[in-house]
Image (tube, rainbow, N blue to C red):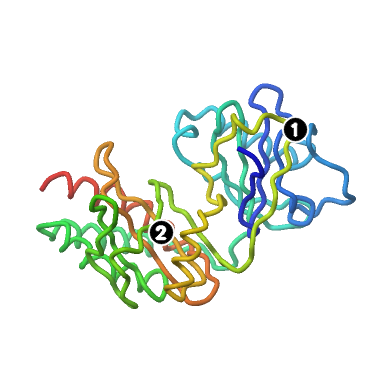
């Protein structure tokens, strides 16, 4: 594995779990973190780059067993005057911190979150098959997210079949590679940044990364669909990946807090209902 790169809308820093020294850093770390000079941060203690508050938060989340299976949200922090949002996951012996500019949209109130969850729960529980589940859900998700199109796709052999969509119609053969983590392509035209390394890249897995670069064919599919931004979320039943949700937008866009929270509650509700048929 050579030439690791990530999407340019965020920065990635990975450090050794044993000595907390940085082993991987994307080339845009200095600009996003407000670091002075061009001295490499590779080999530097993570505390000296992200600060004590973020360092202790990362040390705490490193103790969670779930960090090897999914990204954990660390929260919003200010680093060198920059308001940043930080998440983390484990990749082999490394802890990977993903850093993006903090969202400008306010967090939804507890009432709004509860209202969305109850709406989703009611629509899922009222459905009698997978088609009805997603016909009931995609319109709601389009309203919550503001994306031009939201579709539910079910894997059928080598392709995926569109089960339901709200907005612009999708081709049944436009299959996207997904996993159970939400993956965001904020702007396909923004490009990528190289990840610099002081360690063996063969031991570095970015499958849980929100900043991982989509494969070239996926970018071409988005261009054919006239989309500049995309969000995917896999739907899993037990250990089986049933299909996925895909959000498309004609201009650059990132999902708001309300959308992310809705998706985090949606996955277990849909999985449980699909498993009951």
200 versus 229 height, above or below? above
The reply to whether residue 42 is visible in this rendering is: yes
Per the rendering, the mark at residue 69 is none
Residue tagged by mark 1? Answer: 198
Residue 210 in the image: state x and y as whole percent. Answer: 53, 50
The residue closer to the viewer here, 16 or 162, is: 162
Which residue sits at x=90%, y=50%?
A: 37
Please say if 267 is above or below 170.
above
Label 1 neighbour load within 10 Å: few <14, some 14-19, many 20+ = few
Give the mark toward the camera: 1 or 2: 1
Q: Secondary structure at mark 2?
A: helix
Determine the residue positioned at 46% across, 40% down: 70
Q: Quadrant of residue 52?
A: top right
Outermost residue to the top: 18
Q: What is the count of numbered marks?
A: 2
Indicate the position of residue 42 as horizontal and vertical percent values: 78, 36
Left or right of residue 38: residue 60: left
Q: CA distance from mark 1 to mark 2?
A: 43 Å
What element does badge 1 sit on?
A: loop
Disc on the earlier residue, 1 or 2: 2
Residue at position x 24%, y 52% in the image: 270
* Residue for badge 2: 110
Q: Quadrant of the N terminus?
A: top right
Q: Is residue 101 visible?
A: no
Question: 152 or 189: nearer the eye?
Answer: 189
């Amino acid at each position: 594995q050579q030439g690791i790169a990530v999407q340019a809308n965020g920065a990635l820093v990975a450090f050794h779990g044993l000595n907390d020294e940085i082993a991987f850093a994307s080339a845009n770390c200095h600009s996003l973190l407000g670091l002075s000079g061009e001295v490499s941060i590779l080999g530097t203690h993570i505390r000296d780059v992200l600060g004590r508050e973020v360092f202790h938060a990362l040390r705490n989340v490193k103790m969670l067993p779930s960090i090897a299976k999914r990204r954990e949200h660390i929260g919003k922090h200010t680093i060198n005057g920059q308001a940043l949002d930080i998440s983390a996951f484990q990749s082999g012996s490394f802890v990977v911190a993903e850093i993006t500019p903090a969202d400008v949209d306010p967090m939804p109130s507890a009432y709004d979150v509860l209202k969305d969850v109850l709406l989703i729960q009611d629509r899922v529980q009222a459905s009698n098959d997978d088609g009805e589940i997603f016909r009931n859900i995609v319109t709601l998700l389009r309203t919550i997210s503001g994306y031009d199109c939201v579709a539910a796709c079910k894997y059928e052999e080598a392709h995926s079949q569109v089960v339901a969509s709200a907005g612009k119609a999708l081709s049944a053969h436009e299959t996207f590679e997904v996993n159970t983590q939400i993956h965001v392509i904020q702007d396909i035209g923004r490009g990528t940044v190289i990840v610099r390394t002081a360690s063996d890249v063969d031991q570095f897995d970015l499958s849980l990364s929100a900043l991982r670069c989509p494969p070239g064919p996926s970018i071409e599919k988005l261009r054919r669909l006239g989309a500049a931004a995309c969000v995917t979320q896999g739907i899993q039943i037990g250990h089986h990946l049933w299909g996925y949700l895909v959000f498309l937008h004609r201009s650059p866009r990132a999902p708001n807090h309300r959308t992310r929270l809705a998706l985090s509650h949606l996955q277990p509700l849909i999985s449980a209902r699909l498993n009951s048929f």
